[in-house]
Every structure is written in structure tokens, then in C-alpha cells.
Image (spheres, grey):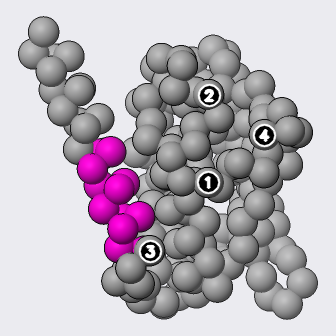
Amino acid sequence: NVGEIRKAGEHLLQLINDVLDLAKIESGNMTVSLEPVLVSRVVTECFTLLQTQADLQGVRLFATLNNHENAYVVADNTRLKQALINLVGNAIKYNKMGGEVELSVSQQEGKRLRVTIRDTGQGIPLARQCEVFQPFNRLNAEMSKIEGSGVGLVITKRIVEMMHGTIGFTS
């Protein structure tokens, strides 16, 4: 019982933190500190934090850095980690038992790096894809046992844009 109470408390704390982050972003009070960040280090830190969740879901995590192990991006280290944790965490959470999540890094034009997260989950129907970055919209996942607030992707999108990046998806 104590374990369940603790789990519920942690979930509630995460929901509160998500809503506070969204409020900070919406009010213009969230700032980013842009500096060179080693991408491979942030990826390793994110995978370390998410490995237990992946193991519990039976999902295999792996990274394909494509010779970018020493690549730096100009970003806010904490906010980049937050964005990657949210994206990889969602890929794990909405995956299937025995599925996989791959994070890959590739070179784009103009010295930009693309971080791609691919998973083997069920995907998002075409008719619902326009709703993905809407706050508090969980695309009917609220009817499932999957926990969440529906603001994670909104926060992630805004954080990425604050760091002069772009975010999108295909399903």
C-alpha cells in the first residue's frame, strides 16, 4: 500500500510540475541558458534515467549516434535533457511489450543536428495528428491505464523552439 501511495504522490508531483512549467512558458517567465552541450552525454543521461521504465515495459532502448559522439549543439543542457526525457519517455510509455525505441542523431544542412526518436508503438491516426501538440489533449489515452497530463509534448515543443530548434513527427 505504501508503494502505491508513493507512486501516486510521485505522479501527482509530476503533473503539478508539468502544469507549472507550462504556466512559466505561457507567461514568458521560462528562460533558457544557451551553451555548447555534448549531445552524446545528454543522451546517455536520459537513457540512464529511463532504463528502468523501459525494462518494466519490456522495451529495448538504443542510440545510433552515426559518428556524432563528439558533436555539440547550442542548447540549454537542462531543458534539452527535459525534452529528450519527455520524448523518449513517451516512446516507451506508448509502446508495446517487447517493442523498441531508437534515438538517432544525423547531420542536417547548415551545421544542424537532427535527433530522431523512432518507436514501435501503435502510432497516431492521421485524423488525430493535428492534436498532438495541444495542451491537455491525450488523444483518448486518458481512457487507458497510461498515466499523463497531456502537456508534456506542448512543453517539449515550446522548449525546443526557445532553443531555436524545430520539432515534428511522422506516424
Looking at the image, the residue that sits furthest to the left is: 2
- Which corner quadrant of the image does residue 12 belong to? top left
SS class of the residue under badge 4? helix
The residue pinned by badge 2 equals: 140
Mark 4–mark 1 Cα distance, whole angstroms, equals 11 Å
Q: Earlier in the sequence, mark 1 or mark 3?
A: 3
Q: Earlier in the sequence, mark 3 or mark 2?
A: 3
Residue drawn 72% across and 66% down? 167
Specify the segment rendered in magenta. Answer: 14-25
The residue pinned by badge 3 equals: 26
Q: Nearer the viewer, residue 71 or 52?
A: 52
Residue drawn 48% across and 17% down? 145
Mark 4–mark 2 Cα distance, whole angstroms, equals 10 Å
| Magenta stretch contains residue 23 | yes
Q: Is residue 42 visible?
A: no
Mark linked to residue 128? 4
Q: Is residue 92 above or below residue 40?
A: above
Q: Is residue 68 visible?
A: yes
Mark 1–mark 3 Cα distance, whole angstroms, equals 13 Å
**Horizontal and vertical percent for residue 77?**
44, 75
Amino acid carrying label 3: it is Glu
Mark 3–mark 2 Cα distance, whole angstroms, equals 24 Å
SS class of the residue under badge 2? loop
The C terminus: image quadrant: top right
The residue pinned by badge 1 equals: 134
